[in-house]
Each structure stands twice: as structure tokens, then as C-alpha cells.
Image (spheres, rainbow, N blue to C red):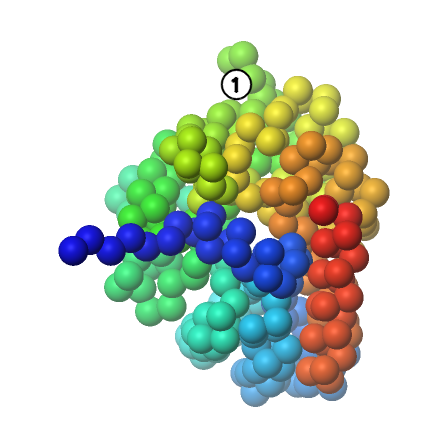
Amino acid sequence: MSTTTATFGQRLRAATQQHGPLCAGIDPHRALLESWGLAYDLDGLRAFADACVDAFGGHVGVVKPQSAFFEVFGSGGVAILESVIHGLQEAGTLVLLDAKRGDIGSTMEAYATAYLGDSAVAPGDALTVSPYLGFESLRPALDTAAAHGRGVFVLALTSNPEGASVQHARAGEVSVAEAMVRGAAAENAEAAVAGDLGSVGLVVGATVGDAVRDLGIDLAAVNGPLLAPGVGAQGGNADSLRRVFGDALPNVLPASSREVLSAGPDVAALRARAHETNESLAALLS
Ligand SMILES: O=c1ccn([C@@H]2O[C@H](COP(=O)(O)O)[C@@H](O)[C@H]2O)c(=O)[nH]1
């Protein structure tokens, strides 16, 4: 008897239909820990992480821990990141690990195994990846994710102003960003035929203004989730999401870290902020 595993795209669609589109970030900055009255050390990191898991687990569809803020504490920080991933998943929340990995074949294979394989210590449901060694260099992550019902989010038009110098550049006929759109759309073609959301997403910042229009990019053609960081602290809001995404708004996963996290340390207040943000985003995207 064969069993079928739901794809990441299917799981993500179900999660956002249940809870709303917000992707809540967990970014334990020093300033945030201190504003919560926590020390910037492993104990403070653990307390911060536990509060986020309590507040978001089972209440937010998808959560994005930023790996760097855990890695900075060494192996103890990585262990806390692993417990965050397990805690959220046990509560039924999808985890998009923001680690932006990207390398050549054998090394990319190791990253794919480490973050997306079934033998990984704490595999995310999806991983952010950097395509600047070429879209096809991501093949091990694309294939490992697909084989295990997981997803990847490929950087396309990042929210930082410096990104344009690389991502708007032309590579032959098309911009670098458009090449990522084409790559993701090809990976999602089968899901599109089945009427499902694909499992290969793109990262397109909420702050990129008219770049999508100016570069002639059709984001709806991706048929995959569009992670939109930059909501809140970086200045992105409902108007900017409309301006950037247009027809592709239904596939947008707006991401916000500092704006949501600033409601802590009280778990109920943090959860309430996530609910309010989700409600206003759901009204925008519906
Ligand atoms: O283009 C990108 C890609 C990733 N990020 C990440 O998202 C969060 C944003 O945090 P805020 O506090 O909501 O500004 C952070 O982890 C970034 O590394 C991004 O901002 N832009």
C-alpha cells in the first residue's frame, strides 16, 4: 500500500487558511532581549525562545526563526534553536528556518541533509536559500525538500536596498530576479497543474517598491509562496504589500519579526499582537 505525504505547499496553504498569513519571525536581537528584561546570554536566549514558542505555537501558521541570532551563542544557541523548531512543530506550527544557505554541489548536498533531510537533528518545514551560485546549484535542497514534503524559499528581491545591485542586474535577456522567478515556476509546474500551491517559494521584500513592475516580473506565475520580509520595523505595510505584489497578493506570506516581538515579554500580549497582525493582514490579502 502506498502512502502519500502532503507537500509543503499543501501544508502551508492549510496553515494559513487556519491561522492567517503572518509569518512571525523569531529574531533574538540583543536590544529585544534587553527590552524584555532578559540578559543577553544563554539563559536569556532560552527564556526568550520559550516565550515565543508558547505564544506562537499552535496560534500562528508559520514561524521563521533567524538562525544567525542563535548561532551567535555557539553550540548552546544552536541547541536552543533546535528546541524552538521541535516545540513549534509539536504545537502544529510550521517552521521556516531562515539560514540563507547556498553553496556548490557537495556542500549544498550537506546543507540539504542538515536542514531538510529526515536524518537532520531539527529539520525545518522549509529553509531560505541563496541562489547566487546559480539557481541550479540549489538542486540538492530542491530535491531533498521535495522528497520529504518540505519547502525552500529562494532569495529573489530582498528587502535591503543593497540587493538591487545584484538582483536587478541583467543576465542575458532577463534580470537575475526574473531568473529566480522562472526557476521557481518550473519547480512548481506539477503543483500548478494539480491546482496546488507549489513548495518552492521566493523571498520578495515588502520594501522593494516598484521593482517587480519595473523589471516586468510576473510573481503570480511562480505559483508558490512569496515570503515578504520587511513588514513593520523596515517600513513595509499594507500599502507597500499591495504595491509590490498586485495580483500575486493571495500567495504572499508577510513576515514580521521586531514589530511583533516588541509586544513581549508577556506571552499573552505577544500572542495577541500576532493575532491582531494576522487579522489585519488576512483582511488585506483576502
Ligand atoms: O530580504 C530579506 C530576507 C530576510 N530578511 C530577514 O527577515 C527578518 C526581518 O526582521 P524585521 O525585524 O521584521 O525587520 C530578519 O530575520 C531578516 O534577516 C529580511 O529582512 N529581508
Q: Position of residue 27 (x, y in %)?
A: 63, 66
Mark 1 sits on what residue?
171
Relative to residue 207, is residue 82 depicted above or below? Answer: below
Residue at image point 50% right, 62% down: 95
Q: Where is residue 89 in the image (x, y as percent from the top left)?
A: 46, 70
Q: Which of the two residues, 280 or 56, is positioned nearer the viewer here?
A: 280
Residue 218 horizontal side relative to residue 108, left or right: right
Q: Residue 17, how many percent across, how many down?
A: 60, 56
Helix, strand or loop status at disc 1: strand
Provide residue 64's location: percent of width, then percent of height: 57, 61
How dense is the environment of label 1, judged by Cα within 10 Å: few (below 14), some, or many (20 and up)? Answer: few
Q: Is residue 259 left or right of residue 194?
A: right
Q: How many labels does the image show?
A: 1
In what quadrant of the picture does the N terminus appear?
Answer: bottom left
Is residue 58 in view? yes
Q: Which quadrant of the view contains residue 239? A: top right
**The one of 279 and 104 positioned closer to us in this rendering:** 279
Q: Which residue is drawn at 45% across and 75% down?
A: 90
**Callout 1 amino acid:** Ala
Look at 59% across and 81% down and name the residue there.
Answer: 54
Outermost residue, front direction? Answer: 1
Residue 150, compared with residue 242, is above or below; it is: below
Q: Nearer the viewer, residue 284 or 231?
A: 284
Q: In which quarter of the image is residue 190?
A: top left
Relative to the observer, which residue lies in front, 29 or 234?
234
Can see residue 134? no
Question: Residue farthest to the top?
Answer: 173
Residue sitting at x 72%, y 29% = 211
